[in-house]
Image (cartoon, rainbow, N blue to C red):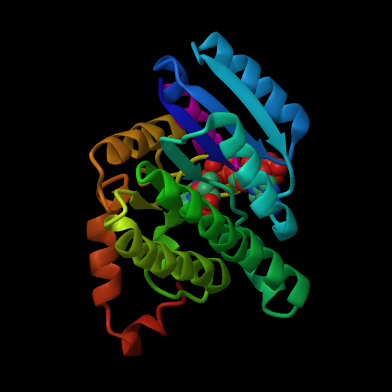
């Protein structure tokens, strides 16, 4: 039986990933901050076939709780096969340009909390010499744009951290995957006008589980974002800065 830890478990994408593992009769630990929503998700996962579901309710930006909570998860599961880090906030770019609180909220939610968690999780995975650490990032981290460079910089920092961690844990038998997502129709993007480039969370979740099984390193989801970002990255900065993107 697979043992799965989902961090940021109330995310629409994370919920779809959890459902796939529930169908496989996995044991799941869900970590989020919305106790009521975690309870509803846990009930639903049991209906979908999960062997057992346990909830941990903590704000993930409470960094002081990370080490203790990670130890608590290992006390319960003994060994973890897959960990998914899914939490994040889009934040308000315009506000963050003038308001330090908003800036730090975006950076802490999308970067600092992730690297803190990954540090404690990596210690445990290294000791057990197996398992997969999967992190959700964004194509926004591939190039700084004026419309969302605060969020993008947090995702970019996470990508570099995760790449380095993958290299470090390789010899220990631990796999580390970075998922770079394009536009996904979730509560995070509820105010955006949707178009042909938008994906549904269940399709993205299937890609995440497939990527984990195939032990990929970096996965763009949907796949076509790899090519879109190749084009975007190839635009010279002298032109890019005039595009108002
Ligand atoms: N949707 C997209 O187009 C898109 C594109 C690229 C990357 N991503 C990334 O995909 C991941 C999942 O996002 P989503 O699209 O599934 O959006 P979502 O449904 O809004 O999920 C984001 C989740 O993060 C949780 N969260 C944020 N800060 C937290 C904190 N301090 N403590 C605990 N939980 C916290 C939220 O919990 P609450 O419900 O308690 O607020 C929410 O459940 C995020 O990392 C996002 O940046 C999304």
> Which of the image's four quarters has the N terminus?
top left
Give the prevailing secondary structure in the magenta stretch.
helix
Range drawn in magenta: 8-20
Q: Is residue 66 above or below residue 144?
A: above
Residue 18 shown in magenta = yes
User: Image check: 7 left or right of 18?
Assistant: right
User: Image check: 105 left or right of 29?
Assistant: right
> Which of the image's four quarters has the C terminus?
bottom left
Outermost residue, bottom direction?
A: 238
Q: Is residue 120 visible?
A: yes
Q: Is residue 190 visible?
A: no
Q: Is residue 48 above or below residue 85?
A: above
- Residue sitting at x 39%, y 69%: 160
Of residues 5 and 79, the one nearer the viewer is 79
- Residue 99 percent coordinates (x, y): 76, 76
Outermost residue, front direction?
A: 127
- Residue sitting at x 58%, y 48%: 87
User: Image check: 69 left or right of 146?
Assistant: right
- Residue 4 percent coordinates (x, y): 48, 32
- Residue sitting at x 40%, y 39%: 199
Where residue 190 sits, quadrant-wise, is top right
- Residue sitting at x 43%, y 57%: 138
Of residues 136 and 77, the one nearer the viewer is 77
- Residue 13 percent coordinates (x, y): 50, 37
Residue 65 shown in magenta = no
Of residues 128 and 182, the one nearer the viewer is 128
């Amino acid at each position: 039986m697979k043992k799965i830890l989902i961090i940021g478990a109330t995310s629409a994408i994370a919920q779809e990933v959890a459902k796939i593992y529930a169908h496989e009769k996995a044991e799941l630990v869900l970590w989020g901050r919305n106790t009521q929503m975690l309870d509803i998700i846990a009930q639903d996962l049991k209906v979908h076939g999960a062997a057992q579901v346990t909830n941990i309710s903590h704000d993930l930006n409470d960094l002081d709780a990370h080490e203790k909570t990670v130890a608590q998860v290992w006390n319960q599961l003994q060994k973890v096969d897959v960990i998914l880090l899914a939490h994040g906030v889009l934040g308000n770019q315009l506000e963050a340009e003038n308001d330090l609180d908003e800036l730090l909220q975006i950076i802490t939610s999308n970067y600092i909390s992730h690297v803190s968690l990954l540090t404690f999780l990596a210690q445990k995975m290294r000791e057990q010499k197996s398992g997969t650490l999967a992190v959700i990032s964004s194509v926004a981290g591939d190039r700084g744009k004026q419309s969302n460079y605060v969020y993008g910089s947090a995702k970019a920092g996470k990508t570099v951290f995760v790449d380095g961690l993958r290299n470090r844990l390789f010899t220990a038998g631990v796999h580390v995957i970075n998922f770079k997502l394009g536009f996904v129709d979730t509560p995070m993007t509820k105010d955006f006008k949707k178009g042909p480039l938008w994906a549904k969370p269940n399709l993205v979740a299937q890609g995440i589980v497939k990527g984990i099984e195939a032990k990929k390193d970096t996965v763009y989801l949907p796949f076509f974002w790899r090519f879109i970002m190749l084009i975007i990255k190839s635009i010279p900065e002298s032109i890019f800065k005039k595009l108002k993107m």
